Image (cartoon, rainbow, N blue to C red):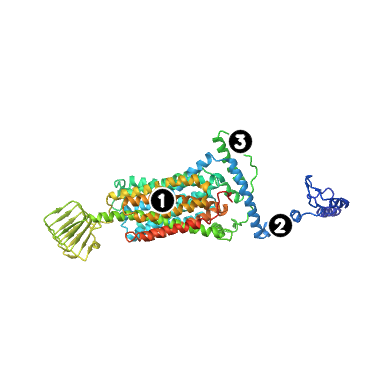
Amino acid sequence: QGGREANQVSDDYRYQDGNYEGYAPNDSYYRGGDEPAHEEDAQSDVTEGHDEDDEVYEGEYQGIPHPDDIKEKQKQRAPAVADEYRDRADLMAERMEDEEQLAHQYENIIEECGHGRFQWTLFFVLGLALMADGVEVFVVGFVLPSAEKDMCLSSSNKGMLGLIVYLGMMVGAVMLGGLADKLGRKKCLIISLAINAAFAFLSSFVQGYGFFLFCRLISGLGIGGSLPIVFAYFSEFLSREKRGEHLSWLCMFWMIGGIFASAMAWSIIPHYGWGFSMGTKYHFHSWRVFVLVCSLPCIASLVALKFMPESPRFLLEIGKHDEAWMILKQVHDTNMRAKGEPERVFTVSYIKTPKQVDEFIEIQSSTGTWYQRWLVRITTTFKQVWDNVLYCLTAQYRMNTLMLAVVWFTMALSYYGLIVWFPDMIRYLQEEAYESRVKIFDEEEVSHFTFNFTLENQIHRNGEYRNDKFIGMKFKEVRFEDSLFEECYFEDVTSSETFFENCTIISTVFYNTDLYEHIFINCRLINSTFLKEKEGCHLDFEEENDFLIYLVSFLGSLSVLPGNIISALLMDKIGRIRMIGGSMLISAVCCFFLFFGNSESAMIGWQCLFCGASIAAWNALDVITVELYPTDKRATAFGILNGLCKFGAILGNSIFASFVGITKVVPILLASSALVGGGLLALRLPETREQVLM
């Protein structure tokens, strides 16, 4: 037995030395042994040599191998080193080389799969998610006039409610966009839509302002995360020739969301009776029905998404070759059956998968409790997301990221600022016209009279009212100045923007009214009694002016249709950079014409022109952001830039709204200069229409 072991050891060593009988080296270079030396000499004496495939290379000396060939052969002969002992830089270099090969192979596979039924099905499913994002932007603006009365909101509370959705969207875009590069497009999009649907639905039922604010914040967080994921998800099923055009068509669903919200607000909110009450505390008015209806696109997309597969490009990035292959085969077979060619066979048998570098720390069930395992899992995931965020600022992507950030921010600052400023300016013009029709009554004396009708847009100065009754009536924009009320009786009275200033009120009874203490400014109340004051706030019937606001939003959303069509048709012809720069510069020119908008119709016209011109820049920004970053960083980068966009929207809303009724110069100059600066900077970005998705 000892002899046999010795012989085996001897054989092993002989095998390793290359002298083992029957072992043939796998390269063409001499490595010792019994081969005659004169053959090597003979090969060295010729200037035309033959390789193993009998190909002739003229003029190249064949006796001494090329240095690159030597390195390659040495690399092949070198013993394999386990990944854990290799330098991370080497692993990353190998991964980048694999990703480049995968990018070109994947492009060929998508072209073989074709563009057909599968992509169009996914187009409508993701379009509903994008439509939900468009709806979310408009919802609060439409319900605010009603909600402020229903919840007794102050001016500061109204402003917070308008901005809280953008704050949620900003956080959601960064957080969920980053998670989509680690957990998957489909999974994170489902999480995003589920959060939005749940809290949007819940917000329609809550009564308190604080809880309603919280629900809209979390709802915005959910839908904010959907935008980066939708574009990253859909782009990974599109070939290079189709990508720009069909991503632009997808952007049309944002416009459809705005039209849907405007139409629903117009048809639902004015119907005050579309609701119910439970006692005196719980009221479900028509604006809450509107909020409920606006959650339908999100719910529909959430249900349909359950039947869609994960992105195969993402699966290949994390090393799941077989799952990715099955999905690509499903795409191919679905499209071929729709084209009437079910016999076409999916010819791809193997797809390159990049080197896996990330290490995911996991605690086994035997070495930790369940919450420790989840804590480590969550911590590791967020660390990887943070590493992705930092990667977007590395030398390779820093300049592109910074330029895109400026373009996104300037576009959002001007666009979102102006789309809030337009309705506010129209309201201001309406209020000016309303105030110009005010009726003024001086030194009137009324006694033993019963007021049981509405008083609106009136000013009463130095009047005297004795033994009068105000029963079952409404004061609307009414002001009493330096007047006397003696032995009067107010019952079941509601008021809106009504004040008593420097008045003397003697022996007067207020029963079941909402004439609270704060509306009596510098008044003397002598022997007057307040009984059973109305509780809470009370909705007014919608004014005719509100219909105009709905119409303005509807026309603003509809006006982007021509811009959407033009950008989709020309995106792959003139390129993304020219589209962004040209659209932003044309939008800046439109801003200057706002100086001539001194009427409601003029403001509506310029709003439509501005929205139609700027939409092409938005579409091209979405496309180029998707194409500039690799697959494992794509949703993260889009989320960061879209989060910055929402921050610009918050600033734009705050800054532009503060100048309504003061001056038009600052908002117009700020918007136009931001658009010009962003448009010129966009021209320095790299063109991406000819490159494959990395």
Label 2's element? loop
Instruction: Give the total number of marks visible in the rendering.
Output: 3
Going from the N terminus, do you reach mark 1 or mark 3 first? 3
Q: Which residue is mark 2?
A: 81
Q: On residue 344, which mark appears?
A: 3
Q: Is residue 321 above or below residue 405?
A: above
Q: Estimate the x, y position of residue 626 in percent, counting from the top left.
A: 53, 51
Q: Estimate the x, y position of residue 181 in percent, counting from the top left.
A: 55, 53
Answer yes or no: do the residues labelled 1 and 2 have beta carbons within 8 Å? no
Task: Left or right? Give the position of 355 relative to 26.
Answer: left
Q: Is residue 349 visible?
A: yes
Label 3's element? loop
Q: Which residue is mark 1?
A: 611
Q: Estimate the x, y position of residue 505 in percent, counting from the top left.
A: 16, 63
Q: Nearer the viewer, mark 2 or mark 3?
A: 3
Disc 2 to disc 3, C-alpha distance = 42 Å
Disc 1 to disc 3, C-alpha distance = 45 Å
